Image (cartoon, rainbow, N blue to C red):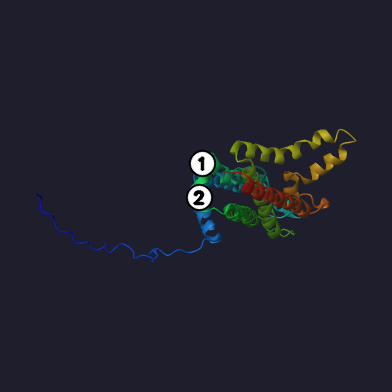
Amino acid sequence: MSTPQPPMPQQAAPNWQAAPGSSYTSPIPVTPTHLGHALASEWTKIKSVRSTMWTLGVFLVLVVGIGFLVAVQTTDEDFGDVPYTIPAFFGLILGQICLITLGVLVVSSEYGTGMIRTTFTASPQRHRVLTAKLIIFFAVAFVVSAFAIGLVGLFTSGMHSGGSEVSWGGTVVMGALYVSLLGTLALAVGSMLRHSAGAITAMLGLVLVPAIMPAFLLMSESLQTIGDKMLEYNAPNSLAKIFHLDDENGTGGAQLGLLAVVTAAAIAGAFVLLERRDV
């Protein structure tokens, strides 16, 4: 017969095991997320990717480079009734394409690579992510644009004596605001289309078609009104008014206002689609 074994003593629970009814408290502090966190994230993204350096670098080369080349060909008499920032206008005609491209890439590149899923996982409030992208992009675009236009104005004014009768401080602000709004509009279009090539093509069509079509529309009397409006509000002529090249029809305030309204409508559409569609 087998000898009965004595009962095993009951072991004490490990020290790490929580007592019944108690809750675990993480040693890592947990703070509610807010827009500032999203802004910090988008700032890190936009300054880290190569597309930002390339597009803004080309933008500065076009605006400042072409501006300097035009400025050295001018004389004191050329600035009697126009601001010293006029040379920057010629660079902005091409440079605005760089800001349009960057605006699209800020959002569409994340959809193309699939990183937008990671972004929305870290920040489920999608509207907060898009708001941060809009704020960061607009701030960067405006500062860089104002710097480029102002630098050309300072260079030109230093070359010529006598002083221009037209104040050029307003052209720095309005010119930078116009091209920055174009880039912001491109960001909103990129958010809606979610495709880099498609959004860039759509924006180029929005900028170039109104500048080309009036040449054909003005041939017909019935379409002349539409042609005149396109001619008045297209991007090149809007910038020309801002830089006082066409003071007879205003100083660009109406054109800037129209662009602001269109951009606001596109942003509203981007927010609506962002919440309704899946990633």
Q: Nearer the viewer, residue 38 or 184?
A: 38
Residue hosting label 2: 121
Q: Is residue 77 visible?
A: no
- Asked if residue 198 is positioned above or below residue 78 in the image, the reply reads above
Q: Nearer the viewer, mark 1 or mark 2?
A: 2
Q: Residue at x 51, y 57 (%)?
A: 40
Quadrant for the C terminus in the image: top right
Residue 253 appears anywhere in the view: yes
Q: Which residue type does callout 1 highlight? A: Gly
Q: CA distance from mark 1 to mark 2?
A: 12 Å
Q: Position of residue 160 (x, y in %)?
A: 66, 55
Q: Position of residue 259 (x, y in %)?
A: 73, 50
Query: Label 1: which residue?
Result: 114
Callout 1: helix, strand or loop? loop
Say which quarter of the image contains residue 218: top right
Outermost residue, front direction?
1
Find residue 257 and name its label: none
